[in-house]
Image: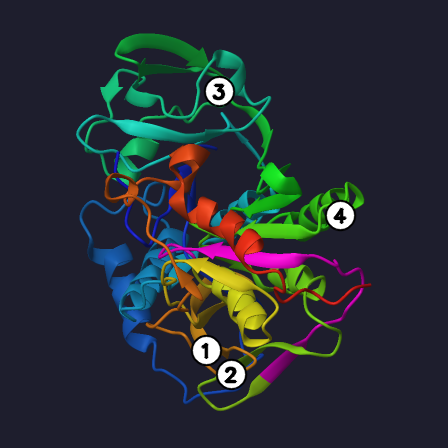
Amino acid sequence: MKRPDSSTISIIVCFFIIVVLSFSLIFVLGERGTAEAVDVSPLQDLAQTIRSEYYFYDDKKLDSEKLVNSAMRGMITSLDDPYAQYYTEEEYKQLLTENSGDYVGIGISVQVPDESGSMVISVYEGGPADLAGLKKGDIITQINGTPTANLSLDALIACFSNDEEKPDEIIYLRDGVETTISVKRTEVHIKRVDSSVLSNNIGYIRITEFNGSVASDFIAAAKALQDQGVRNLIIDLRDNPGGGLNEVLSVANTLIPKDSVIVSIRSKSGDERVYKSEGGEQFNMKLVVLVNGYSASASELLTGALKDYGLATIVGTQTFGKGIVQSFFHISENGGWAKMTTDAYFTPNDVCIQGVGISPDLVVELPEELKDTSIDLIEPAQDTQLKAAIGVFAQQASLPKAIAR
């Protein structure tokens, strides 16, 4: 099962939450400067012509709100910005719910389907799919009677029922055996931080994205590891597509000395916002950060800051190279929300990694047969990058460390 493309790392079935390379700010339209007014009278004329002349026009099927939303989507599409998107008020509320960490769904992450179906990347403990017996590595071949092989994201989403009260029938393959289960959606909590103690008392924390309660979950995990006597910590940011600024800054506060610059964000007009560490609870542990070509945006922000200050050894492969920021603008009382690229960010050493990425201190590839496999599907015994990260602590007695409390 191959990885999905770099703009969509996984699909979380909530329905689905599509996790994209994201790093976003929120503004109200007009808050960030002004520009020459755009003549929108042609749009008004067209809308009126459609309403008065279109033979099949039906207010119940094609009302004014739908026309306006379609026009706004068209404007955003014309930007040729892969990260730009228009959301209606309802879609925006759904987005906030998805990013909060709790949603109504079946509780799995899956890969974009290939010729065999859609592979399950992870199953959320205690969720409907977990209780129904679905496991990581299972191949979903049918949803409600529709084969999933080679489906697009939209087509895969459409396979699920719109009725939350109606269970979805899922057929999956495991070790060549086909099984049918019925799964009803309930409230699910997305677990974005996972921690454990590896061999030689090395701590391990994996962050899958910087949304929801990631910062508080990371702090709790790091504190628990430190209280167990762990002094060496691996932070795994592989396949982490990014997330919100506040969450990644809150994590950085625990690893970077107080008043040190974490990131600078600059607009096209040259306006700059500088974010410094607020300090707080910090952890006295030597650090290794694992990254790969799917570590992007907020992941690169944290990695870049730790690398610039010499606070961590970076292991893995070149990161994705997303050094730009998207902002959300509330269009008007009757409009929705527009997301578009507005800024670039710079590491403490004044480097913008857009289109370039961050080079690891120690370049380590996965085995050839695993290079296109999701990190969640790789067993530790096969994970050459994780082994290399563990080896760093054994080979270097004097690693950089985060400042003690």
User: Which residues lie in the magenta part?
Assistant: 273-295
The residue that disc 2 covers is: 266
Residue depicted at 49% across the width and 62% down the height: 314
* Disc 4 to disc 3, C-alpha distance: 33 Å
Of the residues shown, which amino acid type is indicated by label 2?
Answer: Arg
Q: Secondary structure at mark 4?
A: helix
Q: Nearer the viewer, residue 109 or 226?
A: 226
The residue that disc 4 covers is: 226
State which tag comes first along the sequence, 4 or 3.
Answer: 3
Q: Are marks 2 and 1 in contact (CB under 8 Å)?
A: yes
Query: Within the magenta stretch, is there residue 274?
Result: yes
Does the rendering let one see residue 379? no
Query: Within the magenta stretch, is there residue 328?
Result: no
Of the residues shown, which amino acid type is indicated by label 3?
Answer: Ala
Residue 118 left/right relative to 200: left
Of the residues shown, which amino acid type is indicated by label 4?
Answer: Gln
Residue depicted at 67% across the width and 64% down the height: 401
* Disc 1 to disc 4, C-alpha distance: 35 Å
